[in-house]
Image (tube, rainbow, N blue to C red):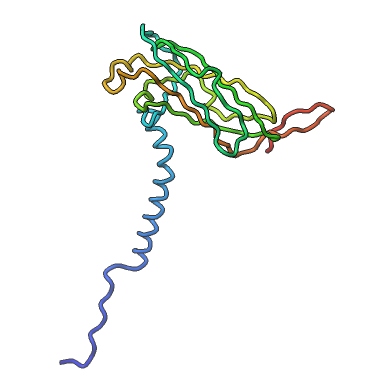
Amino acid sequence: MSDNPAAPKKPGRNNGAVVLMCLSFVFGMGAMSYAAVPLYRIFCQVTGYNGTTQRVDQVSSVVLDRTMRVTFDANVASGLQWDFKPVEREVNPKIGETIQVNFTAENRSNETQRGQAVFNVTPGEAGVYFNKVQCFCFTETDLKPGEKLDMPVVFYIDPEIVKAVESKNIHTITLSYTFYPKEGPKPVASNEGGAEKIEKKL
């Protein structure tokens, strides 16, 4: 029997390769997480999942002799000192009829504030049939101190809602908005030639 101790076995994997694999996994998971939000948003817009309404460019060419009660809910998240509410609490349009409703927002603070409205409808099954032609929620909103703004929403209920098993018995839809503070440059007042005007910060 030899007196020399057995030589240590070489590791099956190179340590550098293992580290590289771990880093690739971490970066890959990070990229997937970053992409998850826009992909989820696209999925909701296409399917109406989670009460997400549809954005369309054309009005409906079919109007049914049946009405749908549509109620409105308005909320403001912390960080915005706004008074936000619908002008009418509910409407009863015919299914397929394109109508306009209005909301108002007033900035109660002493500074210009920027907000972005997010929305959904309940019950969630109605989301795919709630079509918006025009909406203040498509863009950000800036309000100067004390400024009050009228904001229209133009929409119609897709007549297909009466055909689908999960939605044919829906008689009331609630359209809900929540305004959240939006980060970014805000308009500031400056005086030029004795007249006050609004400029954008660069």
Tag count: 0
Is 20 in front, or is 35? Answer: 35
Give the residue furthest to the left. 1
Give the residue at x 37% y 33%. 43
Q: Quadrant of residue 161?
A: top left
Please provide percent x and percent y for residue 187: 68, 33
Q: Quadrant of residue 36?
A: top left
**In what quadrant of the picture does the C terminus appear?**
top right
Is 133 in front, or is 143? Answer: 143
* In the image: residue 132, left or right of residue 198: left
Please provide percent x and percent y for residue 99: 48, 12
Give the residue at x 15% y 92%. 1
* In the image: residue 134, left or right of residue 147: left
Give the residue furthest to the top. 65
Is 189 in front, or is 97? Answer: 97
* In the image: residue 53, left or right of residue 153: left
Please provide percent x and percent y for residue 78: 57, 39
Give the residue at x 75% y 28%. 197
Give the residue at x 72% y 29%. 198
